[in-house]
Image (cartoon, rainbow, N blue to C red):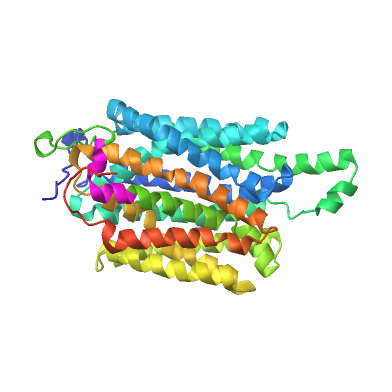
Amino acid sequence: METIIEPVSHVDPREATSKNPYLLPFILVTSLFFLWGMAHNLDSILIPHLKKACNLSNMQSALVDTAVFFAYFIMALPAGILLKRLGYKQCMVLGLLIFATGAYLFVPAADWLSYPLFLFALFVIGCGLTILETTANPYAAMLGTPSNATGRLNLAASFNGLAAMVAPIIGANFILSGKEYTTEALAAMSNVDRTGYFMEEASSVKIPYIILGSTLLLFAIVFCFVRFPEMKVPTAQTAKGGFFSVLRHRHLFLAVVSQFFYVGAQVCVTSFFIRMAQQGAGVDEKTAGYYLGVYGFLFMLGRFVGTLLMRFIKAGHLLMTYAIIAMGLCTIAVLGQGIYVVYALGLIGFFMSIMFPTIFALGIVGLGEDTKTASSWLIMAIVGGAVLPYVMGGLIDYYQDNTQLGYIVPLCCFGVIFHYGWSGYKLKGDRLLKQ
């Protein structure tokens, strides 16, 4: 029988300003989905931009994703421990402060034209994001009736989709210069001119990341002065388990696997989107950045449409349907030609939109006190975003900068997600998984 999670509020009813004491906390937590969405979707701009500024290969440029998402793997367990000891509110404030620190580190990285320092700054950002996501995803799911948890999480995640539209537009206007030189042209420059070009490209990231860091500090201050209800699970209904024993829940274990491949697929699609648009459609990098913004709009639209559809269609069925459509669109991206390749990638954004929150919500169903530990596993699975884009970058380099062939990687990932939506999410008893 499914364990029902019942939120318990520590907010004094006399201090409630509305009939719904969860409304303001839900709005503020939803803002976090937008903020970390900005960070992730600016990475899609940073990859081609730093490839130019630091003169990198495709595989080296993919280390932008590796730095961010490896932090999820390293910090997921500590984030879960912090969540148990500090609670939701304190962890959200801590995550915002670490996130802001990473954003400010972009200034010395640009001044010194240091790719390793850029990667360290991104790793710090990833640590902050890990704490925020480990905290905010289950908290948003529990801020209300358990029956609406999946829809509520998708609604909050819709603002992550809004960031997927806004970030590429900001990046295209304030980070991408539109200047790009061939290897031969760079070799023909004097050392002074070449260094000046690299420094100019690197410096364009400073203002956007200073603004981002300052915004994060402002939100951290606001969170300090707002009362948040702390959610608890009745201990009588649940049994405690260790960090690894939580994987006895089959649907959680498969959710962790699916989340690994989903995040890998999403990051692969967006990280090489601009390069794909340049190669496949012959557009310049700024125009490609705007196309990435259209992808973000479709991603956002998909979140809202998916939230609506889940009122009528079971979450697992919708996940399965979206996954098989994404597989078809990936096939077009690999085999197609011209602008239709870019259209296919844009539409993938629509059908990927519900996958992360849906897998997350289905994975924590009926887990009781194991929910916080399960959240750490599902966030740790985000390491797929560190591994698979690096594999994709290596594949592209191996085939002489053929970006289209690289999209075989997300195609395979969507196959794993299809299986989870077909049967993997179903509860089939709590037994330890055997090797």
- Residue 76 position, x and y percent, is 39, 35
Quadrant of res 378 = top left
Quadrant of res 214 = top right
Q: Is residue 318 left or right of residue 52?
A: left
Stretch in magenta? 245-255
Residue at 42% in and 54% down: 262
Q: Does residue 325 sit above or below 211 in this rendering?
A: below
In the foreground, 344 or 285: 344
Q: Residue furthest top?
A: 85
Q: Is residue 435 left or right of residue 15?
A: right
Regarding residue 427, the answer to whether it shows in the image is yes
* Magenta: main secondary structure: helix
Please count the marks in the image: 0
Q: Is residue 301 left or right of residue 192?
A: left
- Residue 195 position, x and y percent, is 82, 39
Regarding residue 224, the answer to whether it shows in the image is no
Q: Does residue 356 sit above or below 24 in this rendering?
A: below
Residue at 51% in and 52% down: 267
